[in-house]
Image: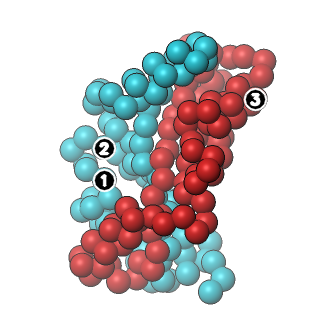
Chain colours: A cyan, B red
Amino acid sequence: MVKVKVFVTLKEGVLDPQGKAVKGALHSMDYFEVSDVTIGKYMELTLEENVNIKERVQEMCEKLLANPVIEEYHYEIEEALQR
Amino acid sequence: MVKVKVFVTLKEGVLDPQGKAVKGALHSMDYFEVSDVTIGKYMELTLEENVNIKERVQEMCEKLLANPVIEEYHYEIEEALQR
């Protein structure tokens, strides 16, 4: 089995109201050192080993996991896990 | 400025309906090699440099960014960014 970590974040310039809200909340809790917050998604997929994992994961990201219009993604493929 | 990446995931044993839904969607798209999906949050904080960053970030996670009852978190502090 292979573990893949997928990170999805908003593209530069896309409004991030959730990040803004969290920043506001942190300021109201006296964490004034926080100058910016962006919020994204983090997914862990467990996959059966496969010849073209990279290509398949990229397809999954483009088609389902990320919205390529407003989001960008990257992923890390981890060494095989024990069954 | 310092960039901190925060990863929040559900604890083992906590139901993850969102992950289940994504797994179901991937299967319906013929990605049958996916045996498990878990969904979490990924946050990037930009902070002003501070003596006790580690401690402050840990506090932010415990108090606001993660729900320590059902979620666990980890974070990575990146080298200083240029202003």
- Quadrant of the image for the C terminus of chain B? top right
Q: Quick one: B1 or B20, which is closer to the camera?
A: B20
Q: Quadrant of the N terminus of chain B?
A: top right
> Is A22 on the left or on the right of A13, as rendered?
right
Q: Tell me the residue that label 2 is attached to.
A: A71
Residue A70 place in picture, x, y as percent: 25, 41
Q: How many marks?
A: 3
Task: Using the rendered image, report if marks 2 and 1 lie on a common chain.
Answer: yes
Residue occupied by mark 1: A66
Q: Badge 2 sits on which subunit?
A: A
Q: Which three-letter amino acid code belongs to the residue tagged 1?
A: Ala
Q: Residue at x 72, y 16 (%)?
A: B50
Q: Residue furthest right?
A: B51
Q: Which secondary structure lies at badge 3?
A: helix
Q: Which residue is mark 3?
A: B55
At 21% from the left and 44% from the top, the residue drawn is A69
Can you tell which mark lies on residue B11? none
